[in-house]
Image: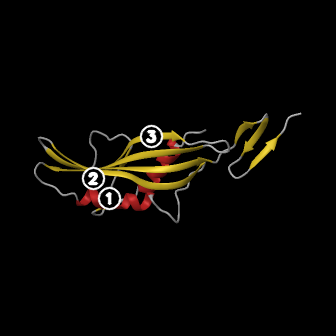
Amino acid sequence: MKDPGIELQTKYASLLSDITYGGVSVPFYDVVPLEAEYPHIKVGERTLIDRSNKTSFGMEVTLGLRVIDRFPANYGSRTSVYSISGDIKERIRKITNRMKLTSFNVVTSVVDNEVMIEELTDTYFYFRNEIRFRHIIEDVGRGYLTYNGDDILYNGDKIAFKRYA
């Protein structure tokens, strides 16, 4: 079973890289730089559960995103964070035109959970919306399985048996 992490995060980056708010581009960060722009989107935690069976390699993957905006202390609004989060959900959760990866079939993409967090520091007021997406993903690459002494070639769309004499 291959790991879909790089392909999935790369796809997220391409789907979310042109989001704007108030006419300004919203940066997409893997690692937030010291002089980050606000608002921005940051990749969060990822989980993977193996859901393989006798005939296919599959997995359930969650990937978190954080939408963060910052204001001077005692000032601000959630509007930017809600608006950007709405754009993200529209792009990731497409049902009629599912997310396409090169080596994987993304069967479903749903919002697993979403949490709005406020944080007040000495200098800033932060609004952070944490969204976790859940994906059911199938590995469509070539692979060999063994069943009753037979090698089974799986190439993503059909299974072929090869018996050795």
* Relative height, residue 34 to residue 76 (above, below): above
Q: Quadrant of residue 85?
A: bottom left
Q: Nearer the viewer, residue 137 or 149?
A: 149
- Is residue 107 positioned above or below 139 on the image? below
Q: Nearer the viewer, mark 2 or mark 1?
A: 1
Q: Where does label 2 land, which residue?
A: 39
**5 displayed left or right of 115:** right
Which amino acid, by three-letter code, is at mark 3?
Thr
Q: Secondary structure at mark 1?
A: helix
- Does 127 appear above or below 2? below
Circle 1 sits on which residue?
Answer: 84
In the image, taking residue 154 as reference, residue 27 lies left or right, namely left
Q: Which residue is mark 3?
A: 47
> Mark 1 belongs to which amino acid?
Ile
**Residue under the point 12% across and 54% down:** 75
Q: Are marks 2 and 3 in contact (CB under 8 Å)?
A: no
Secondary structure category for the residue under label 3: strand
Question: Which comes before the other along the chain, label 2 or label 1?
Answer: 2
The one of 49 and 123 positioned closer to us in this rendering: 49
Which image quarter holds the C terminus?
A: top right
Marks 3 and 1 sit apart, C-alpha to C-alpha, by 23 Å
